[in-house]
Amino acid sequence: MAMYIVSQECIACGDCEPVCPTNSIIEGKIVFEIDAETCTECEGDYNEPQCVAICEIPNCILPLKAA
């Protein structure tokens, strides 16, 4: 699966970008975006998605399946 960033919640702080082990987070035109093709939800690297762990905004980054 993959994660996605809820654009209405993202404040574009950029904290999530450097912690992504697959470099799937990129700066979009307004907020950051996650490439669903390369995002692994950090499986095999960490116990939880690192973008979610670092993000201070509740419900800003969610599993794509919940979209």
Image (spheres, grey):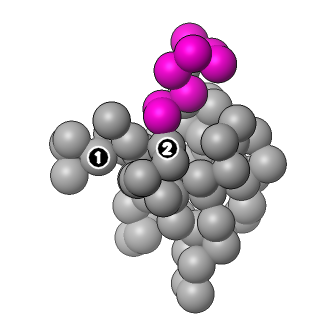
Residue 12 against residue 42 in the figure, above or below: below
Magenta segment range? 40-47
Query: Looking at this rendering, what residue extends furthest in the bottom direction?
Result: 29
Residue 37: x and y, percent?
42, 52
| Disc 1 + disc 2, Cβ < 8 Å | yes
Q: Residues within 10 Å of mark 1 (few under 14, many from 20)?
A: some
Identify which residue is drawn at 73% across, 61% down.
14
Q: Identify the residue shown where x is 56% and y is 27%.
A: 42
Q: Is residue 24 above or below residue 65?
A: below
- Label 1 or label 2, whichever lies nearer to me, is 2
Label 1 sits on residue: 64
**Residue 23 lies in magenta, yes or no?**
no
The tag earlier along the polypeptide, 1 or 2, is 2
Q: Quadrant for the N terminus, please.
A: top left
Q: Residue at x 48, y 58 (%)?
A: 35
Image spot of residue 7 (x, y percent): 42, 69
* SS at mark 1 in the image: helix
At label 2, counting other C-alpha atoms closer than 10 Å, the crowd grade (few under 14, some 14-19, many 20 or more) is: many
Would residue 66 be found to the left or right of residue 47 on screen?
left
In this view, the residue farthest toward the left is 66
Residue 22 shows up from this direction: yes
Identified by mark 2, the residue type is: Cys
